[in-house]
Every structure is written in C-alpha cells, then in structure tokens.
C-alpha cells in the first residue's frame, strides 16, 4: 500500500508516465536534475520558479548549512532575522516593512489580512485565473476553474473574495460601482500560472489608480515574478507603486521562504496589536540564511543577458517547429515563458482557454523528456531559465527541441 497520497505532496508535481515509468528526482545541481536511475535532465521547472541562481548554489548551501548547524528552531528572536529583513527591504523601495512566512500562499493570506486591518473593509478582489495560493479564500477563480470564466452580472464571490477579469478595466470600474467594501485589489505583474499572460499597456497602472480612488489598497503578488526580471520587484521595474507586495520562490533558491513587504503605515496594525500573525517556522534561521545569500548572488547577475538568452531560445523554438509544419507561439519573458499551439499567444484568459491543448502539451513534455529536458506537462505550464542555464546548456535545449519537433512531425504524418 502506498502511504503518500497521489505519489506527491503537491498536485503540481504529477507527471505522466514515460514508457510505463514514473519519474522520481534524486538530486539537483546547477541547471540539471537526476532521477533515481541516475539519468540527467536539463530542468526548466526549477522549483516552479524558486531556483533562479541554479540548484544547490554553493554559497546558499554553505550559509543554510551553517544556520542548520547552529539550531533551526530557537523559538525566540535570533541573530539572522534583522539582517534578512534589511537585505530584502533594501531591494523593495518604499515597502520597507517585512514580515516573513514559509510559503507564497501564507504571504498572500497575510497581505490580505493587512489590507483588511488597514482599511476596515472585508473583501479582496483578485484577478480571475490568477494563482495567489491554494488557501480557500483566494483559490476562488484559480486557473482552470469554472469561476475563472464569468459573465457580466454573475461575478463570483465567496465570503471575503471576489473576481476581476484580467486586462479589463471596465470590469474593474463595474466592481467598484457594485460594492464599497473592497479592502484591496490583488494582482500579479503577469498571469504566470495562466500561461504567462502579459498586461495590456498601462493596465496595471490604471488598476492601481482606480483601486486607490475607491479607498482600496493595491496588493502586488510577486511570489513568482519578484526578483525575476531584476534584483527587486517587477512592479517597481514597471513604475508601479503597490501598497503591499508578496515575494517568495526566487528569493530562497528552493529553501522555503516568503514574505510580505509593505509601507510602514499599512503594516502598522501588526505592530500596534490591531492585527495578529504567527508561524513557528516563519523567518527561521535556515530561511533567513538562504534569503540573504541568494539576494547577494542575484545582485551580481546580468538579468538582461539571461532574458536575451531565453528570448533567443523562444524564437528558435517557434521557427524550428514551423519548419516541421507545427505552428507555435510563446508568451512571457526569456527566463519564464509559455508555449502555445497557436499562431499568436493569448492576451486574455478567455483567449487562453480557447488556445490550450492538453494533448499537445503532454506530447511535447514526453518528447522533450526523451531528449533529456524536463518541462511542465500542463497546458498552462511555463519554462524557466536560471542563471546556471549557460549558452552551452541552451544549445543542448535547442537540440532537444529540434528532436522533439521531428518526433511530433513524424507522429502527425503517421496518423
């Protein structure tokens, strides 16, 4: 009898069998993972975006190991917390107050609590098809759910969450005409889990303005996009000014760590007792050590070169499949992008639902896996590149995509 439900601890880790075999990862280093049969793969899932400097980065391992050896659960304030908070705050502009959590889901939950405490209003509005964690309240309208597609006049709502259509400012205006109890608008710089859907020009700027005009806070969920395009918040890179932001994934190189960063006045309820928080493992020594060493590494990286390397790969993939008679497009950025079996990538979730083809995505995953590249099989999946994905690694990826395109062309011809 198997004791582990579904063979995994998170449903996102489920992969299709290949030749009757399940995949179990045994180790990871740099851009690679090895399975339990010691077969090596180029990793493009990278902890679903948590690994940006490469797996098992020596500096992060060394600092986390030292923290582990000094005691991981001191119960009380410890010597690494303030340094980690200062390191993070130095990269988040006017969002200078930091509250650590263990996961992005917890960080979003805490940010929503902060917005409710500050405004005195109960409801959070989130972008439909955005993934802001798996907790009950904000799981409303997650990608691939029925609620993510809704008609005018039928806006989904639960006790304390409602939905907005991505890239639809008229829908945002309708929301505030419908109700006056919105504490905050929860948005992402890019709807990554919906297939890297990009915001229309000035959409997010207008979203912030409209939210503020109606007394609601702007809460930027940067658990995935934070520190992805530069060593800081993507919202700040784009000239946005959220009141609160959540970060995670890339800031810890795979060690569980996330945080809420916010303006001092917005965070004040947690310091004066109006709002509560907890978490036995929040801001633990290993997490703080991993964050501090990761941010040091990210500060020294050439983000422009990484994005350019990935954009070159994106163009190669599209042209290679086109030469095999298979039409593709991509959306996102060079270090995080999605592949669509359509001539143009979608710009709204409605379009994305019409473009997804799970059979195609599964076939592509298996073809790449045969060639030593591990990618997400989901139709809304993403490919990540880390700073460990050098030119030589990307060249190997191009060879794998070329072989996959040939396999898929041959399979189509044989139908």
Image (tube, rainbow, N blue to C red):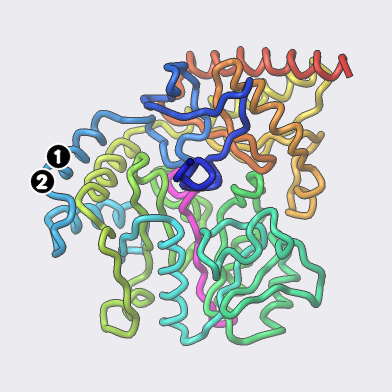
Range of the magenta residues?
214-228
Answer left or right for 23 relative to 90: right
Residue 211 percent location from the top left of the image: 58, 74
Task: Kindly tell me whether residue 101 is visible in this rendering.
Answer: yes
Q: Quadrant of the rendered structure where residue 38 is?
A: top left
Q: 82 and 27: which one is in front?
A: 27
Q: Which residue is pictured at 45% across the width and 31% down the height?
A: 386
**In the drawing, what numbered circle is on residue 70?**
2
Q: Which residue is pictured at 26% across the width and 83% down the height?
A: 272
Q: Are marks 2 and 1 in contact (CB under 8 Å)?
A: yes
Q: Within 10 angstroms of label 1, few (less than 14), some, or many (20 or more) residues?
A: some
Identify the element where label 2 is drawn: helix
Q: Quadrant of the rendered structure where residue 250 is?
A: top left
Q: 201 and 195: which one is in front?
A: 195
| Picture layout, residue 134 above or below residue 299 | below
Q: Is residue 368 a member of the stretch shown in magenta?
A: no
Residue ID for mark 1:
66
Task: Kindly tell me whether residue 32 is visible in this rendering.
Answer: no
Residue 387 percent location from the top left of the image: 42, 29
Identify the element where label 1 is drawn: helix
Residue 413 percent location from the top left of the image: 87, 15
Q: Is residue 221 a member of the stretch shown in magenta?
A: yes
């Amino acid at each position: 009898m198997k004791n582990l439900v579904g063979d995994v601890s998170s449903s996102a880790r489920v992969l299709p069998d290949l030749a009757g075999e399940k995949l179990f990862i045994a180790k990871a280093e740099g851009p690679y993972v090895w399975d339990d049969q010691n077969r090596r793969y180029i990793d493009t899932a990278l902890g679903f975006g948590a690994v940006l400097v490469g797996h098992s980065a020596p500096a992060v391992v060394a600092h986390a190991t030292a923290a582990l050896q000094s005691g991981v659960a001191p119960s009380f304030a410890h010597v690494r917390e303030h340094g980690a908070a200062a390191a993070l705050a130095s990269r988040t502009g006017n969002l200078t107050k930091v509250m650590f959590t263990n996961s992005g889901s917890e960080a979003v939950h805490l940010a929503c609590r902060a917005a409710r405490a500050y405004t005195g209003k109960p409801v959070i509005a989130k972008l439909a098809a955005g993934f802001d964690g798996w907790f009950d309240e904000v799981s409303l309208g997650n990608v691939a759910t029925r609620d993510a597609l809704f008609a005018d006049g039928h806006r989904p709502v639960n006790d304390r969450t409602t939905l907005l259509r991505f890239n639809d400012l008229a829908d945002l205006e309708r929301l505030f005409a419908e109700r006056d109890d919105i504490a905050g608008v929860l948005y992402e710089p890019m709807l990554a889990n919906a297939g890297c859907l990009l915001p229309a020009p000035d959409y997010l700027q207008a979203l912030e303005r409209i939210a503020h005009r109606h007394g609601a806070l702007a809460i930027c969920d940067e658990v995935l996009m934070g520190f992805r395009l530069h060593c800081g918040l993507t919202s700040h890179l784009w000239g946005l000014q959220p009141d609160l932001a959540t970060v995670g994934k890339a800031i810890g190189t795979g060690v569980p760590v996330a945080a809420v960063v916010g303006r001092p006045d917005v965070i004040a309820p947690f310091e004066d007792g109006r709002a509560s928080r907890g978490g036995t493992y929040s801001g633990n020594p290993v997490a703080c050590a991993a964050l501090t060493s990761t941010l040091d590494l990210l500060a020294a990286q050439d983000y422009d070169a990484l994005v350019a390397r990935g954009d070159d790969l994106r163009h190669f993939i599209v042209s290679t499949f086109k030469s095999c008679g298979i039409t593709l497009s991509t959306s996102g950025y060079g270090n995080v992008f999605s592949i669509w079996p359509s001539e143009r990538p979608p710009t709204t979730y409605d379009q994305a639902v019409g473009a997804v083809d799970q059979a195609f995505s599964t076939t592509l995953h298996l073809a790449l896996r045969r060639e030593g590249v591990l990618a997400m099989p989901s139709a809304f999946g993403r490919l990540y590149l880390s700073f460990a994905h050098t030119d030589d690694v990307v060249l190997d990826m191009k060879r794998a995509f070329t072989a996959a395109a040939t396999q898929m062309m041959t399979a189509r011809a044989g139908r």
